[in-house]
Image (tube, rainbow, N blue to C red):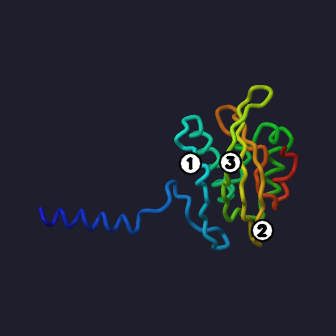
Amino acid sequence: MKTFISLIFVIVIFASFCGCSRVGGTSGTTASGKSWNPKTQALDNCANVPQMAGFIHDMKAFYENLHNKQWAETYKQRNQKFRSLVSEQVYLKEVKDSAWELVDYEVLPPIQQTHDSDGSNKIVTICKFIEGPIEHTAYNTITWTLEDGVWRPDCAGPIRLAIFGQLSR
């Protein structure tokens, strides 16, 4: 019994020192070796609002995909207006060999939920983006629309990669 309790104690100590990082595996480093540590407290504060759970997931997934340069996924996550104006082929060609990277981001308060004149749900966020490879900080307001059960941004937010600013709004 003593050995069992000692083993449990060692496992708990090991887990607390080695296994407790951010939920969802979002911490890490960028291609340039900088720490990936999104500041999403303003977003996480909305987690107790049931209709925000999907939004929180979709927003974090979008920026995680940008950070990881999962370009095909980020294209699919863009809103219908953007996808109707920019073909996936053009989008992927533009970003294919880019040195650009999303170093980090921060969601700033307030997060505002609104309804468009057509009755569609929208959420407006303000974010701070740190872009690389030469570090640059940008702030942007992003309007997210619920389309086909997925929250999609009207613009990516970061501005240093040309395709992000084209035809997005």
Q: Three-letter amino acid code at disc 3?
A: Pro
From the viewer's side, name the closer residue of 142 and 66: 142
Please name the residue shown 69% across and 58% down the image. 69
Q: CA distance from mark 2 to mark 3?
A: 23 Å
Q: Three-letter amino acid code at disc 1?
A: Asn
Say whether residue 61 is left or right of residue 21. Answer: right
Mark 3, Cα crowd under 10 Å, few <14 / some 14-19 / many 20+, is few
Q: Residue furthest top?
A: 118
**Precedes in sequence: disc 1 or disc 2:** 1
Please name the residue shown 52% across and 54% down the image. 24
Q: CA distance from mark 1 to mark 3?
A: 11 Å
Which residue is tagged 1? 45
**Precedes in sequence: disc 2 or disc 3:** 3
Position of the C terminus by quadrant: top right
**Precedes in sequence: disc 1 or disc 3:** 1
User: What secondary structure is marked by label 2?
Assistant: strand
